[in-house]
Image (spheres, rainbow, N blue to C red):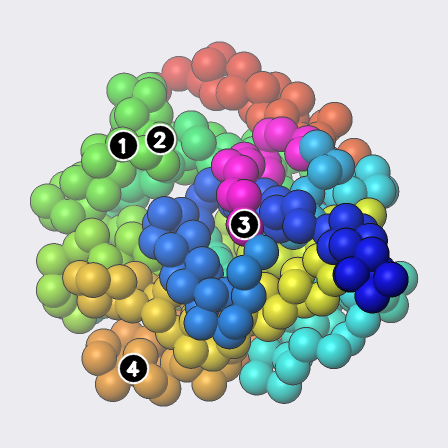
Amino acid sequence: MEEKKAAGAASLRDDSPVIIYTFVYLRDPDRFRTLLEERFRKSGHTRRIEFRDWNCYHEIPDKDGDIYMYDACAMSALVDKGIIRVLPEIIDTDKVFDWILDRSRIKGKTYGFPFMTCANVLICRKKDYTPVNNIFEIEGGLSAPLKSMIGYYSVLAFCNYQDSGEGTINVIERIFRTIGGREAFEDSMLDTEEVIDRFRSGECRYLLGFTENLRSLDRDEYVVQLANLSENDVNEMPLFMTDFISMGYSTSGEKLLDCLDIMEIVTDSSFVHDLCTGEDGLEYMLPADRTLYPVFAEQDPVYEQLYDLVNDENNGILRYGSNFYEDFDLRKEYLLSVVQSMEDA
């Protein structure tokens, strides 16, 4: 009888893998997966993990996932489509910047835990730096991935202006002309070396990019400031793109507990530390964990500047509405058509 009970229990046991939809724009997805798998096994877990690539900016994922990692711009859409679920607040978030936690809830409920954040920043060599309040004050040239980031620049401009007028188009046109017009625009993609090379070679004084771009630059002293995509002297709505980890809507039973353990691993300080320090040194990412900045500043003092950028209670999270997947790419196509009609200065 006992043997039959044991056999019955075994037949009911859920041995299916944890399906993780992985954000393809993580700095090094393969390394992330390796680190996570190693930590999961060291914690005593034997359940298989099945990783799936996912471009959260353009693709609605299937609902078969147990864990989703994505940019917060898609959070409202994922909630609205019933893909991610409300989470119990049992993960330790004491080290996370308060503003990230406060501004990531939907109707007061937690749908995901943050582990990394990111910002559009202006980078300039300290020896070349002249203070600028906004994108319109830049002199000495600018390099920027305008063609890839045009949709996001438009959202930032809208929020920086806090005005629905012509400011957004003016910003796009200003960047278009400051990077050098049509020829530079065609090469202004995130995955091309031209954007970094134009700044690295000294052709441009400023780089509009991400803090991660610092790893591709020559060792030097740099000034890093949040980009203000408006004509205002002060950016009163600084916005960050923030990476979250959430649980699938239908995950249950023992697998649910395994998924919570995975979420604890991904948000743990030691895991994030290892993620931010690759084989070649600092990755210059911005952890949501505020306690890591002093550690990284010991390796490169620029992290003191980066901490000051993130440690501002006025910061907000760049989140789009529930219609993100229906509207955002259409907005991008419209803006690209506007740029096509612009003439070089």
Q: Which mark is residue 49?
A: 3
Q: Which mark is residue 189?
A: 2
The answer to whether the residue labelled 4 contacts the one labelled 2, judged by CB atoms less than 8 Å apart, is: no
Query: Label 4 neighbourhood size at 10 Å, few (<14), some (14-19), many (20+)?
Result: some
Residue name at image x 36 percent, y 86 percent:
294
Q: Which mark is residue 37?
A: none
The numbered mark, 4 or 2, whose residue comes first in the sequence reads 2
The numbered mark, 4 or 1, whose residue comes first in the sequence reads 1
Q: Quadrant of the C terminus?
A: top left
Query: Label 3 neighbourhood size at 10 Å, few (<14), some (14-19), many (20+)?
Result: some
Q: Quadrant of the N terminus?
A: bottom right
Q: CA distance from mark 3 to mark 2?
A: 33 Å
> x%, y% of residue 139?
28, 49
Q: Residue furthest front?
A: 1
The magenta span reads 48-61
Residue where numbered disc 1 is placed: 192
